[in-house]
Image (tube, helix red, strand yellow):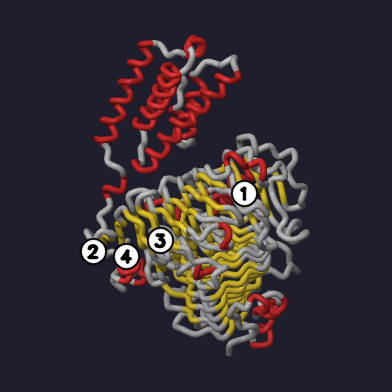
């Protein structure tokens, strides 16, 4: 018996079935017989796969399915084929009895374990026959209460719903589930050739945050002659589609913007039928190409559907082509059929994007997976495991932050914006809604860089309306929420939440505006040249023996231009510290390195800051070489009369303070202006 338990968590049930059958069946010496057996296996496997899609079979049921397939494949061969064939592939009597018992066990186990959807309680039922609350999906969506804050569930009973549906941007966290993608079907036929704009052709459009669909079919039946015709358009963050069908021809699925996750879905089409600008992962999906028009060629496909299978040699098929210059597509751990051209990928127009795109393949299988004859573009590569890990759900989609609570079956890894990922912008729906979270810390044995929930190494990164958290807690010591080791990084309206070492502003020019940064010890630290403008700097309640220190700037070279500037910020206690702030001392900063440079100017300093203002690191380290300065601050903690008397500390005047503005200190006009970000280049007062 072959042990498949160790592989179960890493493979789909379909993969396990194929693996088991290949491992247990004898080798056929006769080629004709061997092909026949393969066809029978494919037939039975296809039946089982469809069964699984509608019943969410897991665990023991999956093992039973393996025996089910083995049993009926063998039995069919035994009954219908020649005596010669039976002699080479006849199952023994005791095997048939054993497998039959497993089939009975399978049926009993499936009956005993209801599918996950049976646990959902719908708020609204849509039924074409009038047996529900509404007969159309659009009316059901309109009935969602405007102030509803939880997940709103709609059950779509079996039927064909001919309507164009829009889940608007105000409709948050909506779930729609059906009775199977070939039973609960939403269909339309709008297309560009008939005069519709591309967005208006969508049979189903999702604009609302946190949408989820399960067991639904989305179709556009316009046909190949009508050119662009979208079945499903998703322009929303944190969208999930499980066991769904997207069926069309050209432009079937428009993955427009936001994080999107598709699992166990079936997507069909001809030209560019998965397109858009979103960050998307398709996991365990069937990508099926259809028969196009005579003059057309297919792309972004892995298998032929029934309309193309017999004629696939007449049409060229490709994995993708670069719609935009920085087109990024990774195909990994997938089965690629023989319909895919050895070239693999197709140009869009001339050399457009061929040196700037990122197309990659990793560990694929099947007759179309051989990369020896692939394109030789500068942007194409066959990657290794370490790089492939960057494109997993956990790292590429930050899946742990939002998929976990949805109960979606998915693998996770940490998030790193690598050095090759330049000029990336990530935006969310608010730092309290779009949250990236982790809990790695030094006390548990991680090295400091590896504790970062989110690490930025790529030039020109920008984040807006995102929350970055490390929830390890104060007892776990150093635990980074955000590490920025990149030049020209911008963070707008973001949250950085942790305790010790929350924000590691490591290297390069960095600009933070309207951000909320919380922590206890050295919670803004590093060697970067960073300006924090109009930010809330919030100190949290530390452990009993600890004290709060906001900054620990690490300038090591005397004449280097790096340092921290906190301009027009608010230094306050958060809710956990406010009532007990008298029990804990809090300071503006301490010198991590000898030439530590920090300027606090035009800011509100609350009464929690010690009159001393600043704290030593260790003895007299850096006290005569550091540069700590204050200018024109306000608030009960801004009085400088009792500040430290170190040689490196000073209260500066306007002329010197001007050196530390965004325009001069970060050379902001040379790179921030073109980004269109809100920024004040000079002094506020």
Of label 1 and label 2, which has the lower sequence position? Answer: 2
- Work out how far the residue at label 2 is from the one at label 4, CA to CA, in angstroms: 9 Å
Residue 405, image x and y in percent?
Answer: 37, 53
- Work out how far the residue at label 1 is from the one at label 2, CA to CA, in angstroms: 43 Å
- The one nearer the camera, 467 or 407, is 407
- The one nearer the camera, 609 or 203, is 203
Can the viewer see residue 206? yes
Q: Quadrant of residue 482?
A: bottom right
Residue 604: mark in rendering = none
The residue under the point 42% across, 71% down is 169
SS assignment at label 1: strand
Please give the residue where the numbered disc 4 appears in the rendered image.
136
The residue under the point 43% across, 23% down is 73
Please give the residue where the numbered disc 1 appears in the rendered image.
330
The residue under the point 76% across, 57% down is 355
Looking at the image, residue 251 sits to the left or right of residue 344; the answer is left
Judged by depth in the image, the label closer to the viewer, 4 or 3, is: 4
Q: Quadrant of residue 389?
A: top right
Circles 4, 3 touching at the beta carbon (< 8 Å): no
Dot 4 crowding, Cα within 10 Å, few <14, some 14–19, many 20+: some
Please give the residue where the numbered disc 2 appears in the rendered image.
133
Answer above or below: position of 603 versus 447: below
The residue under the point 59% across, 66% down is 425
Looking at the image, residue 111 sits to the left or right of residue 429; the answer is left
Circles 1, 2 touching at the beta carbon (< 8 Å): no
């Amino acid at each position: 018996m072959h042990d498949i338990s160790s592989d179960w968590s890493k493979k789909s049930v379909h993969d396990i079935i194929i693996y088991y059958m290949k491992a247990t069946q004898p080798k056929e010496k006769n080629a004709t017989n061997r092909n026949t057996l393969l066809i029978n296996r494919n037939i039975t496997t296809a039946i089982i796969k469809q069964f699984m899609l509608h019943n969410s079979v897991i665990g023991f049921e999956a093992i039973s399915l393996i025996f089910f397939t083995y049993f009926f494949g063998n039995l069919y061969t035994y009954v219908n084929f020649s005596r010669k064939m039976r002699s080479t592939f006849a199952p023994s009597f005791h095997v048939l009895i054993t497998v039959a018992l497993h089939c009975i066990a399978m049926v009993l186990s499936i009956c005993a374990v209801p599918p996950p959807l049976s646990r959902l309680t719908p708020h609204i039922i849509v039924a074409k026959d009038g047996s529900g609350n509404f007969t159309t999906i659009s009316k059901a969506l309109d009935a969602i209460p405007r102030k509803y804050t939880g997940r709103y569930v709609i059950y779509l009973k079996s039927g064909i719903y001919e309507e164009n549906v829009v889940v608007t941007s105000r409709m948050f966290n909506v779930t729609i589930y059906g009775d199977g993608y070939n039973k609960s079907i939403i269909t339309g036929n709008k297309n560009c050739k008939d005069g519709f704009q591309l967005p208006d052709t969508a049979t189903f459009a999702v604009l609302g945050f946190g949408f989820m669909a399960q067991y639904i079919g989305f179709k556009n039946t316009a046909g190949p002659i009508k050119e662009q015709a979208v079945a499903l358009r998703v322009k929303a963050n944190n969208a999930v589609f499980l066991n769904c069908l997207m069926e069309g021809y050209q432009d079937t699925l428009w993955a427009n913007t936001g994080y999107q996750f598709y699992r166990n879905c079936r997507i069909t089409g001809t030209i560019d039928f998965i397109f858009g600008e979103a960050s998307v992962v398709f996991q365990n999906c069937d990508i099926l190409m259809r028969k196009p028009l005579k003059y057309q060629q297919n792309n972004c496909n892995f298998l032929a559907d029934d309309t193309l299978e017999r004629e696939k040699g007449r049409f060229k098929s490709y994995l993708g082509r670069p719609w935009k210059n920085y087109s990024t597509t990774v195909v990994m751990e997938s089965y690629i059929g023989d319909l895919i051209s050895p070239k693999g990928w197709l140009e869009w127009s001339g050399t457009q994007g061929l040196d700037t795109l990122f197309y990659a393949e990793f560990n694929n299988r099947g007759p179309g997976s051989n990369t020896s004859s692939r394109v030789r573009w500068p942007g194409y590569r066959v990657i290794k495991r370490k790089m492939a890990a960057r494109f997993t759900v956990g790292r590429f989609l930050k899946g742990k932050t939002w998929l976990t609570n949805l109960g979606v079956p998915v693998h996770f890894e940490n998030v790193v914006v690598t050095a090759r990922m330049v000029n990336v912008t990530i935006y969310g729906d608010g730092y309290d809604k779009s949250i990236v979270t982790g809990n790695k810390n030094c006390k548990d044995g991680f090295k400091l860089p590896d504790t970062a929930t989110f690490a930025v190494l790529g030039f020109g990164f920008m984040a807006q309306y995102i929350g970055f958290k490390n929830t390890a807690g104060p007892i776990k010591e150093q635990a980074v929420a955000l590490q920025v080791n990149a030049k020209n990084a911008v963070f707008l309206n973001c949250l950085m939440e942790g305790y010790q070492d929350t924000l590691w502003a490591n290297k390069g020019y960095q600009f933070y505006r309207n951000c909320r940064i919380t922590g206890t010890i050295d919670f803004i630290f590093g060697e970067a040249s960073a300006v924090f403008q109009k930010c809330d700097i919030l100190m949290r309640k530390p452990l009993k023996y600890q004290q709060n220190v906001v900054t620990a700037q690490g300038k090591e070279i005397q004449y280097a231009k790096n340092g921290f500037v906190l301009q027009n910020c608010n230094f306050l206690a958060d809710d956990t510290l406010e009532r007990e702030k008298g029990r804990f001392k809090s300071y503006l900063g301490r010198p991590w390195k000898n030439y530590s440079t920090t300027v606090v100017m035009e800011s509100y300093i609350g009464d929690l800051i010690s009159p001393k203002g600043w704290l030593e690191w260790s003895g007299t380290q850096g006290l005569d070489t550091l540069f700590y300065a204050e200018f024109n601050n306000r608030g009960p903690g801004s009085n400088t009369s009792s500040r430290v008397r170190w040689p490196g500390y000073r209260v500066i005047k306007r002329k010197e303070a001007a050196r530390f503005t965004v325009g001069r200190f970060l050379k902001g006009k040379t790179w921030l202006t073109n980004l269109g970000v809100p920024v004040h280049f000079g002094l506020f007062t």
